[in-house]
Image: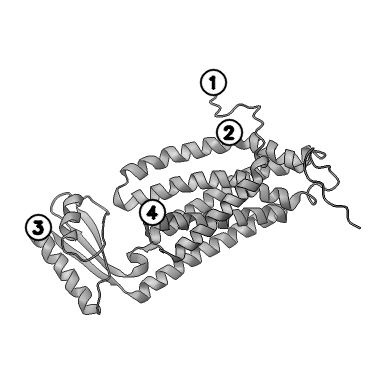
Amino acid sequence: MFRLRLVPDNTNIQFMRGRYAGLIVSALLSLASVALFFYPGLNYGIDFRGGIVIEARTPQAADFAQLRHTLNQLNMGQVALQEFGSPQDVLIRLERQPGDDAAQQVAADKVRATLAKEVPGTTVRRVEAVGASVSGELFYNGMLSLGLAMVAMLVYIWFRFEWQFGFGAIVTLLLDVTKIVGFYAITGMQFNLTAIAAILTIMGYSINDKVVVYDRMRENLRIYKKMPLRELIDRSINETLNRTLGTSMCTLLSIIPLAIFGGEALQDFGIVLIFGIFLATSSSIFIAAPILLFLGENRLRRGVPAPEGAQQPAPTP
């Protein structure tokens, strides 16, 4: 039976030769992402900045291009449209307008009048204003969910593997998250509750990929008791390379249509997931594995000589 193999079974790529470059590039990108978080900062969406949410129903299937053009003519800042339920149901999100609650009501009335004029028969079913306190609470809850997810993953890895594995996985996960935040800052995509969902999805994918590689490393530690750790890590990565690339490709094939045809509501979500898949796959090889090598060189493989050409540790007095 024919089986598709993305790489040959006898692949022997020495990934750990690039361990220093991988860690240095990753650290620099994460530092740059942290700097971008503060300047120019993130483009916070209505969820985290406050604004107006209007639920409307059009007489026929909504023409989103026409609605977006019409509402942008009102010069009320960022306008986001989303279909929900039937093609006639439209969710309109506007930036919070300068002023008090009365200013928000005036803006909502202006949208209502514009819809009645440009799309006769449209009914406005709900109008809500997301205030600063509510948006602040949503932002806090979103950040809390990221923190709790990371703690839960740390506990899982810590109990399943030796502490060197857990430390490497969590540090790599933190570096991945900072790069995703930097990606949002560079692209100017809206950072909202959908962005939190995208980050949580990437975190889960990333930790799953690392668990697969770590499992093979742990198995090989039991099988090849005299093999130097650097050689063993390279062997483990090569053995799981087909599985890693195959999973990434299948996931990409399911997400690319979402990024292309998902519309305004899901397009950014799909693009970030594509970036996150490449990030998670590469970080398992070039960040998590080198961290494990540095931490486990004299612990997971005590008494085993380092490979030829590697720096030998100084003898203890």
Residue at the image point whose x is 32% and y is 74% from the top: 131
Query: Tag 3, which secondary structure?
Result: helix
Residue position for label 4:
187
Q: Secondary structure at mark 2?
A: helix
At label 4, which amino acid type do we have? Answer: Thr
Q: Nearer the viewer, mark 3 or mark 4?
A: 4
CA separation, marks 1 and 2? 15 Å
The label nearer to you, 1 versus 4, is 4
Residue at the disc numbered 3: 118
The residue labelled by disc 2 is 242
Residue beneath label 1, please? 2
Residue type (three-letter) at the residue carrying disc 2? Asn
Q: Are marks 3 and 2 in contact (CB under 8 Å)?
A: no
Q: Earlier in the sequence, mark 1 or mark 3?
A: 1
Which is more N-terminal, label 4 or label 2?
4
Give x and y (percent) for residue 86.
23, 51
